[in-house]
């Protein structure tokens, strides 16, 4: 084992830790904004209670995501200086847009949302959480655009051994990015939906057990139903964008597609194996090209072509990891979406006839067994998301920038094995502590449940009145 191997391990470990928080932040921020919108439009108190409850969980996760994300930038300079030198001119634009536009938008309006309760007019306060949620999604877009460039570099030229951007719009509208962005963001909504389902299921079971409630509290049923709808819709977007990504893989990253199936040689009507040893003829060709008779390139034949094009070397990724990650992603992701569809059916309204003969719909009780199932399914969408990331990044190996820069040529030349080992140990321990801290905080607040709301204050009707309610800061 050398410094390159440990540097890859360090980047993988820290990124997976960071990835535990990012999808939940993206999806949960929008969900909280939707809850507050429901309260604004209907005036129902339970929507306000849910907004503040899930808003608190969102803020805990957001803080941890920021802390763990800072290390990512330092790694580029510490362990991957050659990579930074090569891609710096291209990455500078999307990363600057992410920091100066998206993150500032998100953090500024999130601060206004936190401190604006009973100080800002309700409509203005609602706009702040939507602005923060939009900022989270914009931030994801710029990061994913930079990442997509590594898989399918466009809008650049190589000058003196460095990639120099020639068209920023080509980078931001890269076909790989346009498929990857909706796929990842929709998957983040599935992660957030699974989280809300688990929390709502737990609270339903807890309140029934402790208070002997025989009918569902409107509040937790509303939260659960909202998460079911969000997860089902997001699952459909994940499937559609994943189909587009599969077609692009056939054209742009054929080695990754072949490794995901374990296809060794070029083959028409290529089969797909849901599990090892079971093949569905022509399914891989259908998924990759929408043509059951299309030819899909195989790993061994691509290796020979790459040797002729790029010179001697091993251009094959880790086949067992790529193959298994693909199936874990599909299985766990599909399980979560199926759970949401089942929940929509179980909690659908029941037709009833009123006292005056009018027809209406009565909400159904959430079954205890389904609430338990939601709680047990909590890790599934996160595992699916991490598996998808492993498929995406390990499947690109041995390249950091496809066709331009090998991973072995990206590592810092003067970093020693001991230095990387020490930083790996420190970061792993630190991130482990942070992960435990977030887990403890989330469990504590979920068990405690929503705080009792004080008597509401009248909404400020003018900016002058809102200003009078805001305390003056003395310096």
Image (spheres, grey):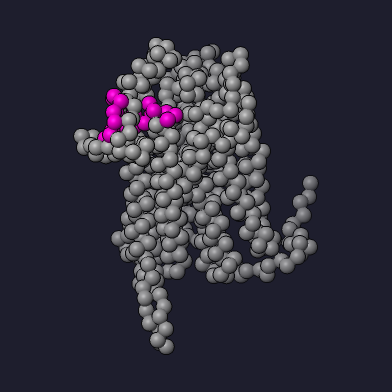
Q: Is residue 45 above or below residue 246?
A: below
**What residue is rendered at 79% in x and 46% in y?**
475
Q: Looking at the picture, how far across and down is residue 440, in whole percent?
A: 46, 47
Residue 66 seen in the current view: no
Looking at the image, which is closer to me, 198 or 240?
240
Looking at the image, which is closer to me, 138 or 412?
138
Looking at the image, which is closer to me, 283 or 201?
283
> Is residue 268 within the magenta segment?
yes
**What residue is rendered at 51% in x and 36% in y?**
175
Q: Looking at the picture, how far across and down is residue 387, in whole percent?
A: 38, 37
In the current view of this chain or complex, which residue is farthest to the top? 312
> Is residue 297 within the magenta segment?
no
In the current view of this chain or complex, which residue is farthest to the bottom? 356
Q: Looking at the picture, how far across and down is residue 215, in whole percent?
A: 37, 72
Per the rendered image, the range of residues in magenta is 251-272
Tell whether 395 sits left or right of 78: left
Q: In this view, does 435 lie above or below 231?
A: above
**What residue is rendered at 54% in x and 21% in y?**
83
- The answer to which quarter of the image holds residue 246 is top left
Tell whether 94 sits left or right of 433: right
**What residue is rendered at 38% in x and 59% in y?**
201
Tell whether 56 sits left or right of 224: right
Q: In this view, does 212 lie above or below 185?
A: below
């Amino acid at each position: 084992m050398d410094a390159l191997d440990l540097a890859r391990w360090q980047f993988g470990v820290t990124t997976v830790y960071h990835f535990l928080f990012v999808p939940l932040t993206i999806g949960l921020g929008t969900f909280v904004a939707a809850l507050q919108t429901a309260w604004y439009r209907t005036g129902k108190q339970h929507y306000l209670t849910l907004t503040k409850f899930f808003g608190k969980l969102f803020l805990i996760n957001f803080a941890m995501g920021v802390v763990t994300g800072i290390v990512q930038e330092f790694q580029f300079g510490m362990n991957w200086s050659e990579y930074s030198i090569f891609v710096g001119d291209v990455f500078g634009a999307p990363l600057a847009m992410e920091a100066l536009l998206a993150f500032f938008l998100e953090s500024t309006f999130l601060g206004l949302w936190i401190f604006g309760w009973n100080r800002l007019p309700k409509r203005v306060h609602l706009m702040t959480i939507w602005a923060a949620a939009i900022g989270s999604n914009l931030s994801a877009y710029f990061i994913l655009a930079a990442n997509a460039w590594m898989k399918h570099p466009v809008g650049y030229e190589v000058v003196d051994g460095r990639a120099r951007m020639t068209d920023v719009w080509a980078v931001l509208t890269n076909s790989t990015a346009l498929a990857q962005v909706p796929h990842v963001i929709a998957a983040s909504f599935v992660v957030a939906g699974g989280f809300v389902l688990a929390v709502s299921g737990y609270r339903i079971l807890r309140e029934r057990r402790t208070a002997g409630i025989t009918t569902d509290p409107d509040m937790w049923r509303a939260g659960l139903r909202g998460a079911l709808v969000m997860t089902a819709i997001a699952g459909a977007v994940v499937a559609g964008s994943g189909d587009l990504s599969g077609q692009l893989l056939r054209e742009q990253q054929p080695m990754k597609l072949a490794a995901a199936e374990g296809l060794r040689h070029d083959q028409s009507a290529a089969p797909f194996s849901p599990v090892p040893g079971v093949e569905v003829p022509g399914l891989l060709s259908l998924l990759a090209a929408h043509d059951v008779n299309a030819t899909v390139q195989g790993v061994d034949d691509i290796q020979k072509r790459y040797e002729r094009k790029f010179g001697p070397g091993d251009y094959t990724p880790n086949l067992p990891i790529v193959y298994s990650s693909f199936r874990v992603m599909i299985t766990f992701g599909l399980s979560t979406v199926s759970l949401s569809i089942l929940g929509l059916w179980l909690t659908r309204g029941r037709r009833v006839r009123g006292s005056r003969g009018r027809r209406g719909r009565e909400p159904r009780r959430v079954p205890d067994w389904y609430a338990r199932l939601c709680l047990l399914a909590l890790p599934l969408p996160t595992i699916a998301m991490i598996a998808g990331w492993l498929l995406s990044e390990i499947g690109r190996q041995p390249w950091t920038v496809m066709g331009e820069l090998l991973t072995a040529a990206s590592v810092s030349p003067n970093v020693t094995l001991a230095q990387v080992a020490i930083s790996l140990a420190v970061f792993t321990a630190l991130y482990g502590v942070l992960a435990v801290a977030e887990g403890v905080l989330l469990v504590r607040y979920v068990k405690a449940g929503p705080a009792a709301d004080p008597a509401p204050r009248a909404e400020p009707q003018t900016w002058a009145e809102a200003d009078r309610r805001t305390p003056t800061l003395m310096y």
